[in-house]
Image (tube, rainbow, N blue to C red):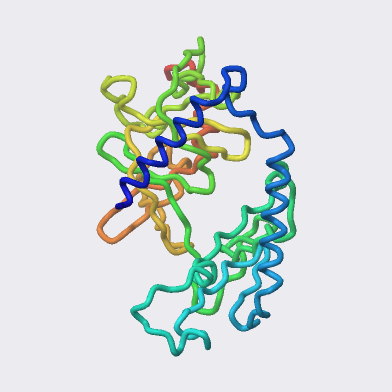
Amino acid sequence: MDFLEIRKKARERAAARAAAQPPSAAGPAPEPPADAAPGAASTAAAALAGRVQAMPEPDPARFTTWRPGEPPPVPIDPSALPAARGRDPAAPASPLLAPLVEARPPSAPAARDPLDGFFYRADEEAPELPELGWAADGAQAPLEPGQVRLDEFLTFALGDEEYAVPVERVQEVLRPPPLTEVPRAPAPVLGVVTVRGRVVAVIDPRARLGLPAPADAGEDAWRLVIVDAGDGPCGFRVDAISSVVRLPAGSLEPCPQGIGGDAAECLLGIGRERDRLFTVIDPAALVRRSLAPPRRAEGGQGGGA
């Protein structure tokens, strides 16, 4: 009799026994008690503990101790272990060695207080910056041997001519803000503007230097240079900004005789950079002359002999 016939006979006997039972006894199988699962788990745990105790003591060289916060352990080569040296390399590795080869992921970083980033820490201090040519009190630092002190000038265009002012007198360069005219103001004063909450007078250097009036090329066709000559900020209307020129200290050449006319006191000298020449303006003198009331022509009565 083969295996299939045996299974058929067993199924027939089970069906006959079920049919022979009384109807009252038939019904679903009773569910196991609620405490059966914990009991089975305890039995399995006890059996597993017994098997672990029966195992031989492990070799300390085969295991790596790892604790949270430490870098991941270095994987161990199973072929280097004493128990694996005589084993066939083609044979599958033992499942007991898999946890040793697999690197464990590092633990999550400890939670930090969000306010730690806003509080001062001693390790945030940076080394002091090197000297950039200025002392702590604002004065220029002493020069090194062989070093030449340089003066800087901001050059700009007034028509076809190029002028400049010392950079130390310049505060900022702005696009033309809205200009408000002032009644009965001196001719060089175009009006006033508001710069960072302060009212600043705008002067046209052309009117004091004897240059022709600029052509009306639009509101954004000029720039405003804010200078401070010592009495507060004042604005110069210029056609365009050229560049910043550095010249050795004391290299300005005096203006030739007859250059400048009545505005000669507003000029500091002539700057030369290779073949380029520009006239350096004295901002303090230009502001003083521009804001001064116009001089009245002295009249006299002529008498005949």
Residue located at (47% from left, 22% from top): 189
Tell me the residue at 64%/79% (across/down): 58
Examine the image and state in which quarter residue 24 appears. Answer: top right
Viewer-closest of 257 and 99: 99
Quadrant of the snapshot with the C terminus = top left
Classify 238 as above or below 75. Answer: above
Instruction: Indicate whether 187 appears above or below 4.
Output: above
Q: Position of residue 39 (x, y in %)?
A: 73, 46
Is residue 148 visible in this depiction of the protein?
Answer: no
Q: Position of residue 298 (x, y in %)?
A: 50, 21
In depth, the one of 244 and 15 nearer the eye is 15
In the rendered image, is residue 122 in sight? yes
Query: In the image, 105: left or right of 177?
Result: right
Placement of 155 over or under 92, stated as above or below: above
Percent position of residue 36, x then y: 70, 40
Residue 254 sits in which quadrant? bottom left
Q: In this rendering, would 141 be left or right of 91?
A: right
Circle count: 0
Q: Residue furthest front?
A: 20
Q: Residue at the spot x=51%, y=16% of the render?
A: 185
Q: Residue at x 74, y 38 (%)?
A: 35
Front residue of 28/155: it is 28
Q: Position of residue 19 (x, y in %)?
A: 49, 25
